[in-house]
Image (cartoon, rainbow, N blue to C red):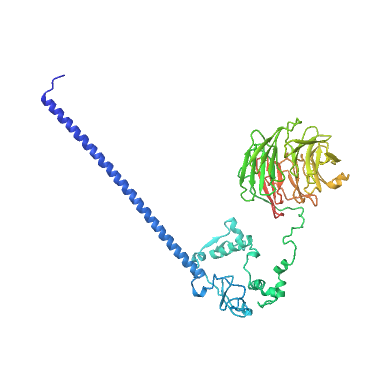
Amino acid sequence: MPWVSRGERERERRGTHTRVCVLGFGMEMAMEDLQQQQRQQKQKKTKKKRKAAGSEARELQRWKSDTEEAARLQSLLFGCLQDPLTHHFGKEIDTFPSPKQDHSLGIDDGYFEDRKGDLVGGDDSPGELDNEPSLQRTPAWQDEDEQAAHVDVSKVNRLRKLRKEETEKFVSGSDYILRLREQHSKLNPRTSWAELPSKDSRGKELYFDSDSEAEGENSRGLDPQSVQDSEGYSILRRNEDLVLKSTSRLPQGFIEITKMRDANFDEPSNAVVQSVQFHRNAQLLMTAGFDKKLRFFQIDGKRNPKIQSIYVEDFPIHKASFVPDGSKVVASGRRNFYITYDMEHGKVDRMSPLIGRDEKSLESFEVCSDSRIIAFMGNEGYILLASLSTKQLVGTLKMNGSVRAMSFVNDGKELLSIGGDGEIYSWDLRMRRCIHKGKDEGCINATALTASSDGRLMSTGSDTGVVNIYNREEFLRGVSKPAKTLMNLTTTVDIIKFNVDTQLMAICSRMKKNNLRLVHLPSYTVFHNWPTVKTPLQYVHSFDFSPGGGYLAAGNAAGKVLLYRLNYYDHA
């Protein structure tokens, strides 16, 4: 250890002491800064709490003042319930006279309550009831800005309907409000049952409500004969239907049709829409296609929200259809099996291939109207009948040629089918045999067949675009000449459908753009005003009428389902 002098040791000791003092002073300053920051944060929190409490108090005060002002305005407009002049308002009036009341009116002397809210002086004489003038109320206040304001009704498209003259441009604020109210009344007319009764009708109600009617006494001073001759009383004396269905015929030549929001606007398809069908309740629409999805939309004509979509793996859907009772959906593709979707339980079931058959594709089928049988088009002219309950093959029907189209008739008891050679077969499903066979006139290669819901008409289509319409009963009797032949299409007829009342029929071809036509069946003519050149139908691959006839939905190759409103029909 080296030698260190005493002076050096003293200087070293003093330096160490100095460093310790400086370090202690620095720590003390840091502690003071930390405490200062904590005090500042606490002050800020206190200020925020006071500010929030103050704002709540001001909001409460503002609410109280608004409530008081609303009560004051309500008192000015409708009167105070404690006002001695209006203490009769809100009291029930006994329509049956008591011994202490005047029997001529059945109410107390003085005032009685008018249903329109007017205070009318009462009298014992019922004849003077209508002669008493009612008190007219004036507005409690008027907005001066309404008179000073001017609205340009020619600038905005939706306000142009408010103009009374074509050159009119500006209207005052008060006149603008009146015109808006008139327009609202036109668009939303009041119903008769919602209007307040007149004094005469109130007198009739008093007449009917009194016990004197049962006793044969007219204590109200009303004429019983005039009451019984009234419209309301005559309705009660008839047993006819109050609402009668329109018996008018759909006019030919021109059809009123309106474009609505696309049915699948919320979720368009990513591929061709192969199937479109309305549910039996007319509020649910199903779409299906090559994107392997079943989609369901609620149709209201305005928003058409999507309800649900089901993805089926490795199953491009060629056709999907509701079972007539609405409980299930059957979907098929180019596979040797098909699937069913249970609407109530939300379950997808894959049906195994039909035992005893080697068909590799079950893409075309029809569902029987009694929801018991599905008919698939098989190979070599075979029609395969499968049970919906057991999911098994229950029978087959054999044609001479290939099967091209089918349609159930007569509540599912009969089946119509057409082959590539143009032969139309009528099958009795109860006996499983052919009851009639006839030739489709002029047909070389048949592609479509359908029958109306009442079974009265049937229609066929061919690859040349020719559509024949037959009377089915006459065809079964051997009359092979069609009632009408339509040649408005020039390419293969893919789909033919009748609407619910058999006044309208639609035909389409997938091979040509905008190739959809509507046919007026009573006259067998095509409507000339629709579709137009600007109608965005594109290549239509599927379409369907709603159960009420009010909607027409058409699915195209772009993945859209166009929705149109047929204005002739009141209900969807």
- 469 sits left or right of 334 in the view: right
Q: Looking at this view, is 271 or 201 the one in front?
A: 201
Q: Residue furthest left?
A: 6
Q: Position of residue 5 (x, y in %)?
A: 11, 23
- 465 sits left or right of 80 in the view: right
Q: Quadrant of residue 15?
A: top left
Question: Which quadrant of the figure contains the N terminus?
Answer: top left
Q: Looking at this view, is 355 or 17 the one in front?
A: 355
- 62 vs 6: above or below: below
Q: Does the rendering let one see residue 8? A: yes
Query: Residue at the spot x=44%, y=65% of the render?
Result: 68
Query: Residue at the spot x=22%, y=34% of the render?
Result: 23
Q: Position of residue 299 (x, y in %)?
A: 65, 49
Q: Residue furthest right?
A: 478
- 356 vs 389: above or below: above
- 430 vs 105: above or below: above
- 384 vs 77: above or below: above
Q: Looking at this view, is 365 or 471 the one in front?
A: 365
Q: Quadrant of residue 476?
A: top right
Q: Position of residue 288 (x, y in %)?
A: 67, 40
Q: Position of residue 207 (x, y in %)?
A: 66, 73
Q: Does the rendering let one see residue 466? A: no
Q: Quadrant of residue 20?
A: top left
